[in-house]
Image (cartoon, coloured by chain):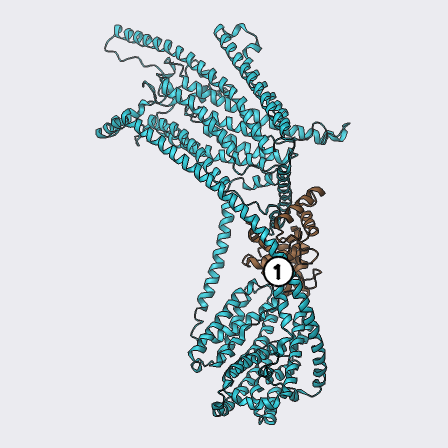
């Protein structure tokens, strides 16, 4: 289902929901696409919105957020993933030492099993206490 | 209708076999689906399904008769049978669900490029399982035929199962169709479910359910199953499955619920449910809009947020404080404007009717000059803006507005309101900081939840990037500060030294101010004309020089102390505050001197006026005692100096000059500097931007103190110049915009961006001190100095507060003033004050104990958290070892399974050639093995289902593919039939 008009509509919506500015836009699309390369079928597209819409439950959002932040798809958020996330968030404004400090600190905070990377349960535990995860991790259509 | 013809034929051929009959319906479905795979038209497909169903029903009725006859035989071995039936049904169900998908796959491939690997896998496994069953079937054919008779009894249930299976197939078709339809409706279908639900409804209505044939227990079970389905539907949104799978599951469960809820007499709440959903959506949208509206209503919120994102929360805290001040001044302005200025302007005597409302003859020619007006003399002085203009008439206008009383109460009210607001805000801030925020995941939250996915505007996004960076920098700074542990003795020594130096500075400047003020008083007594310009302006010059250089000195000294920047800012604020108190002191001294001078003058003038009046009276009296008294134009009447107006004027001038200075320094110090640095940098010999002049940073401490002292002036002067709050509102309004602009355009963020303290109680505390200091002189003048005799609302009274007494006596009934006089008796007032002191003491001690308890609890919580973390780590280690074991076990099981599967595949391939009729024949229930005590045939897939479970115990991973869909609990239904 990748007809031409559908693609156009998709493009339009893509700009409309304002992901243009999102530092994680590529990751989002990659996560939801079935081939992992960023080509969205219609079902993937619907999946994306059902996960990111305002009413979707926290668990679902947590699962997809984990996937989005897991850059190398090894089911763990390791320091390299954190570094990438941080550089995307700050547009590389922090010095390498600061980045390392932040990565170390956040691993230290959230890592419960001491393997110096965040598994999904670590992530879930951390996110479940975050005050503004739900309000920030959604798009309006 | 090739299919139905075919099935009928098939029936004729095979109808005689008792054993086959029980499975006919299911197999029919398979055949039908296989054939359908080649068909194109969906509508035809559905028609066919219906036709087949009808056939099936007819057959079943026939079979039912036979079954009832034989049912008496089936008594023993019920338990095993039940499980067997259950298993069989489940297997069939899986097949029923998967087969159509497998067969429809090819078609789907043509249309859409979605291919689900897990599904293929499951199809394969289903096939292999089928094959196992076939094998078993062949082996156990003889046994099975015997046993079939017993099973007949259960066929009632099996029949229903079969019906369900078929319905599922149709549902699947419908689902696919629906999906396809949905594809077309991409844009329009916001809620695809509802419309498709309708389709389903139509479908179900055609099917007849016979609830009356069920026993109560069965009904119970059915209800349970329905509830489970409902739960599944509800929880479906939270499942991280692809949409396709969700749709299929949703449809199946909805179908099920539809069907049996109807049977159970439920399902009428559907419309209500839809309505509820709609309303909840609407409500949510409304709430969202309302939130947005509320945020939009907060003035300057966006500006402040923008500044905060670029300059950090410390700079933003100044602007928040400024906004708060603006709010307070707005209220003060409303009070004075609404209750004093407007009534006097509207209802009081108009300008020029009495001497106090007229410009004196001597000043009249220059009263309209700009220089005079700018100095608030001339017409400005004789207007509602100042105290002297108000008349002492007790009640004015048709409303009988008590002007003097109102004036007095507003003066008291503004101060009281300010106290109340400041203290209340302080208390609230203290509360907020007392609760404290959970900082256990500070950095992780910042990384994972700080980006707002709603941002679509490039400018906002830039701001967000800046703010995230700033917040990270703040957090990093906090972290570094908490890690820092230098030589504690050296730091202590340096801090003591710094404080000593600062104290020296303060004492020196205090003495300097005192000395200069005394000198200027001496000069004033000698007469100003004999002295030079410097000697005349000494006080002002010294004050401004001190105000300019001392903060710089403090800044240098504070570098010694090595404090956290936030603490350093507070110290800096406190020191400059102490310095500025000197400023305030000189101002008050000068003012008191002036008041005393004016009062001396007033005494003389008062005496002169009485003699003037007497002479006037004598003159008229001697000439002609009956002649009307000579009327003078009010401008000609001699009048006193009116010290109250003078004080008001002083304050207004001070505010104006202060405002001008602030704005001009802003423009020159920040804007001009930034422009020069920016444009001279092209033709300069060193880098101006990075080197010496650079751009200025925003001076938080100076600005905050300026604001606070300005407010102190307002509080001091508001009683004598009702226009002051209005002026201040104007000033704050302008400076909000001007400073916001200046910050964004000519300042650079501080080198060490730090987080402002959660409550700006430090600002508030300073404000409270200033409020106290500024109300003291105001109250002193009101209470001790008698008002001027010929101007202001209290003229003619001994003291200003006599207005209360007067009102009590004339406007209230006699008993009230009596009660009041009793109440104001010291014998009553003193115990009351004592009581209040006791209450304050009690409250204070309780709050102290609460605070202690709070700290204790916090500590406990923290230790518990740490303990939990440690425990979790241990548990995780254990789980890891468990997982490894499980993995090893799984691998062996997997290997075994593979071997089995390859064997069975061979068999299956052989069987493929035998044709469909043969295949259907050879599929007996696999559960036969059960009875022989051998391991069940379903053993092989067990490790496969176990796998995700072990994962989940460790924290299951969504990365490795979506978790397996749980079996929709259809098998519950057949298990009903055991009864």
Most extreme residue toward the left is B815
Most extreme residue toward the right is B685
* Residue drawn where x is 56% and y is 30% of the image: B570
Q: Secondary structure at mark 1?
A: helix
* B894 vs B730: above or below: below
Residue B885 placement (x, y as % from top left): 66, 64
Asked if one can make out residue B86 in the rendered structure from this viewpoint, the answer is: yes
Residue B649 placement (x, y as % from top left): 46, 20
Q: Badge 1, how many Cα within 10 Å: few under 14, some, many 20+?
A: some
| The quadrant where residue A75 appears | bottom right
Report in which chain the residue with disc 1 lies. B
Residue A78 placement (x, y as % from top left): 68, 53
Which chain corresponds to the colour brown?
Answer: A
Residue beneath disc 1: B954
Residue B933 placement (x, y as % from top left): 59, 81
Asked if residue B29 lies left or right of residue B277, the reply is right
Using the image as rendered, state which of residue B330 and residue A118 is in the foreground. A118
| The quadrant where residue B828 appears | top left
What colour has chain B?
cyan
* Residue drawn where x is 41% and y is 19% of the image: B644
Using the image as rendered, state which of residue B869 and residue B462 is in the foreground. B869
Marks counted in the figure total 1
């Amino acid at each position: 289902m990748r007809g031409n008009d559908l693609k156009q509509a998709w493009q339009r919506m893509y700009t409309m929901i304002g992901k243009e500015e999102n530092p994680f836009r590529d990751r989002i699309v990659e996560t939801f696409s079935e081939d992992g390369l960023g080509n969205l079928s219609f079902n993937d597209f619907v999946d994306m919105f059902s996960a990111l819409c305002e009413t979707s439950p926290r668990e679902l959002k947590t699962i997809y957020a984990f996937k989005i932040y897991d850059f190398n798809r090894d089911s763990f958020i390791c320091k390299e993933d954190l570094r990438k996330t941080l550089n995307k968030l700050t547009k590389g404004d922090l010095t390498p030492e600061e980045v390392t400090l932040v990565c170390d600190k956040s691993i230290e905070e959230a890592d419960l099993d001491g393997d110096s990377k965040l598994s999904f349960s670590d992530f879930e535990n951390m996110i479940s206490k975050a005050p503004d995860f739900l309000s920030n991790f959604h798009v309006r259509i | 209708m090739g299919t139905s013809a075919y099935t009928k034929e098939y029936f004729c051929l095979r109808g005689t076999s008792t054993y086959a009959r029980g499975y006919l319906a299911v197999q029919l479905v398979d055949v039908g689906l296989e054939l359908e795979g080649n068909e194109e038209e969906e509508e035809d497909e559905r028609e066919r399904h219906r036709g087949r169903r009808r056939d099936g029903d007819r057959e079943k009725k026939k079979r039912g008769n036979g079954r009832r006859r034989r049912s008496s035989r089936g008594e023993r071995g019920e338990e095993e049978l039940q499980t067997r039936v259950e298993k069989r049904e489940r297997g069939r169900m899986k097949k029923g669900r998967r087969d159509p998908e497998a067969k429809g796959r090819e078609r789907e491939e043509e249309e859409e490029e979605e291919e689900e690997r897990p599904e293929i896998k499951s199809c394969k496994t289903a096939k292999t399982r089928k094959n196992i069953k076939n094998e078993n079937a062949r082996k156990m054919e003889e046994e099975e035929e015997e046993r079939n008779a017993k099973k007949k009894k259960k066929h009632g249930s099996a029949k229903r199962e079969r019906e369900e299976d078929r319905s599922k197939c149709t549902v699947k078709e419908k689902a696919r169709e629906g999906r396809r339809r949905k594809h077309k409706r991409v844009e329009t279908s916001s809620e695809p479910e509802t419309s498709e639900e309708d389709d389903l409804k139509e479908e179900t209505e055609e099917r007849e359910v016979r609830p009356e044939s069920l026993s109560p227990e069965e009904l119970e079970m059915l209800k349970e199953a329905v509830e489970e389905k409902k739960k599944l539907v509800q929880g479906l949104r939270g499942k991280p499955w692809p949409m396709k799978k969700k749709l299929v599951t949703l449809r199946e469960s909805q179908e099920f619920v539809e069907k049996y809820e109807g049977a159970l007499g439920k399902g009428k709440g559907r419309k209500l449910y839809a309505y509820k959903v709609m309303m909840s959506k609407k409500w949510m949208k409304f709430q969202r809009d309302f939130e947005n509206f509320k945020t939009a209503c907060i003035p300057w919120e966006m500006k402040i947020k923008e500044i905060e994102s670029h300059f950090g929360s410390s700079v933003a805290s100044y602007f928040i404080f400024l906004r708060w001040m603006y709010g307070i001044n707005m209220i003060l302005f409303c009070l004075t404007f609404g209750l004093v200025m407007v009534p006097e302007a509207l209802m009081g005597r108009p300008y020029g009717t009495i001497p106090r409302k007229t410009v004196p003859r001597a000043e009249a020619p220059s009263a309209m000059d700009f220089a005079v007006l700018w100095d608030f003399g001339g017409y400005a002085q004789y207007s509602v803006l100042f105290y002297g203009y108000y008349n002492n008439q007790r009640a004015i206008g048709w409303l009988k507005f008590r002007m003097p009383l109102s004036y007095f109460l507003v003066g008291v009210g503004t101060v009281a309101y300010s106290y109340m607001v400041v203290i209340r805000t302080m208390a609230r801030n203290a509360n907020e900081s007392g609760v404290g925020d959970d900082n256990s995941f500070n950095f992780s939250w910042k990384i994972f939840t700080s980006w707002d996915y709603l941002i679509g505007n490039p400018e906002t996004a830039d701001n967000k990037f800046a703010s995230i960076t700033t917040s990270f920098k703040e957090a990093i700074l906090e972290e570094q500060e908490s890690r820092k542990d230098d030589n504690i003795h050296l730091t202590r020594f340096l801090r003591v030294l710094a404080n000593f130096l600062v104290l020296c500075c303060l004492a020196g400047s205090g003495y300097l101010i005192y000395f200069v003020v005394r000198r200027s008083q001496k000069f004033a007594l000698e007469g100003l004309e004999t002295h030079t310009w410097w000697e005349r302006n000494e006080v002002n010059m010294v004050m401004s020089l001190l105000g300019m250089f001392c903060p710089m000195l403090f800044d240098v000294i504070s570098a010694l102390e090595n404090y956290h920047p936030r603490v350093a800012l507070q110290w800096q604020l406190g020191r400059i505050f102490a310095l500025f108190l000197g400023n305030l002191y000189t101002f008050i001294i000068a003012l008191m001197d002036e008041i005393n001078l004016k009062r001396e003058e007033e005494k003389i003038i008062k005496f002169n006026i009485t003699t003037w009046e007497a002479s006037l009276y004598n003159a008229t009296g001697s000439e002609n005692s009956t002649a009307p008294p000579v009327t003078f134009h009010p401008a000609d009447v001699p009048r006193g100096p009116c010290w109250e107006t003078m004080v008001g004027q002083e304050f207004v001038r001070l505010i104006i000059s202060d405002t001008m200075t602030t704005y001009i320094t802003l423009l020159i110090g920040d804007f001009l500097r930034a422009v020069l640095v920016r444009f001279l940098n092209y033709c300069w010999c060193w880098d101006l931007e990075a080197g010496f002049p650079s751009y200025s940073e925003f001076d938080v401490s100076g600005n905050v103190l300026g604001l606070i002292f300005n407010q102190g002036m307002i509080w001091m002067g508001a009683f004598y110049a009702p226009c002051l709050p209005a002026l201040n509102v104007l000033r704050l309004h302008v400076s909000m915009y001007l400073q916001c602009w200046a910050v964004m355009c000519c300042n650079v963020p501080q080198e060490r961006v730090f987080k402002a303290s959660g409550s700006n109680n430090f600002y508030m505390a300073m404000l409270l001190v200033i409020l106290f200091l500024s109300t003291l002189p105001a109250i002193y003048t009101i209470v001790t100095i008698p008002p001027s005799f010929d101007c202001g609302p209290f003229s003619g009274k001994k003291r200003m507060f006599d207005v209360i007494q007067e009102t009590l006596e004339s406007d209230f009934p006699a008993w009230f003033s009596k009660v009041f006089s009793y109440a104001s008796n010291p014998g009553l007032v003193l115990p009351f004050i004592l009581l209040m002191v006791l209450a304050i003491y009690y409250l204070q001690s309780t709050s102290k104990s609460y605070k202690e308890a709070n700290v204790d609890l916090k500590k406990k919580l923290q230790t518990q958290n740490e303990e939990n973390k440690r425990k979790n780590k241990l548990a995780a280690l254990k789980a890891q070892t468990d997982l490894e074991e499980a993995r090893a076990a799984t691998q062996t099981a997997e290997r075994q399974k593979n071997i089995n599967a390859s064997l069975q595949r061979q068999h299956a391939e052989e069987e493929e050639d035998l044709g469909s009729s043969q295949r259907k024949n050879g599929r007996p229930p696999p559960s036969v093995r059960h009875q022989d005590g051998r391991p069940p045939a379903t053993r092989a897939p067990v490790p496969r289902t176990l796998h995700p479970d072990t994962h989940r115990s460790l924290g299951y991973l969504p990365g490795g593919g979506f978790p397996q869909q749980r079996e929709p609990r259809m098998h519950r239904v057949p298990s009903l039939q055991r009864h």
